[in-house]
Image (cartoon, grey):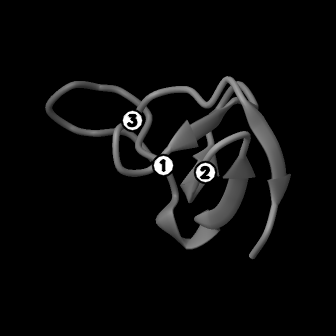
Amino acid sequence: MKNSQTNELVPNFKDLVWVRCKEYRCLAYLDATGKWINFYTGKKLTDFVKIIG
């Protein structure tokens, strides 16, 4: 799905999962290129370890 104002892909929030990184955990989703994105900050996760829920 695309944002009508910015024409960017909008994440499908039904695919949010909890992921564990090296020093924290957060809600995240996979973007269109297969990269994990932090749901709260919108930044790419570079220290992703595993899906925990």
Q: Mark 2 falls on what kind of element?
A: strand
**8 or 22, which is in the foreground?**
22
Q: Tell me the amino acid under the disc marked 2.
A: Tyr
- Look at 70% across and 57% down and name the residue there: 19
Query: Taking 40 as reference, is 34 above or below it?
Result: above
Check if mark 2's residue and mark 1's residue have beta carbons within 8 Å: yes
Please name the residue that numbered disc 1 is placed on. Answer: 11
How far apart are labels 3 and 1 at the CA level? 10 Å
Q: Which label number is shown at residue 42?
A: 3
Q: CA distance from mark 2 to mark 3?
A: 10 Å
Rendering coords of residue 1 (x, y %): 45, 47
- Near mark 1 (Cα within 10 A), the count class, few <14, some 14-19 or many ≥20, is some
Badge 3 or badge 1: first in the primary sequence: 1
Viewer-proximal residue among 32 and 50? 50
Q: Earlier in the sequence, mark 2 or mark 3?
A: 2
Which mark is drawn over residue 29?
Answer: 2
Amino acid type indicated by mark 1: Pro
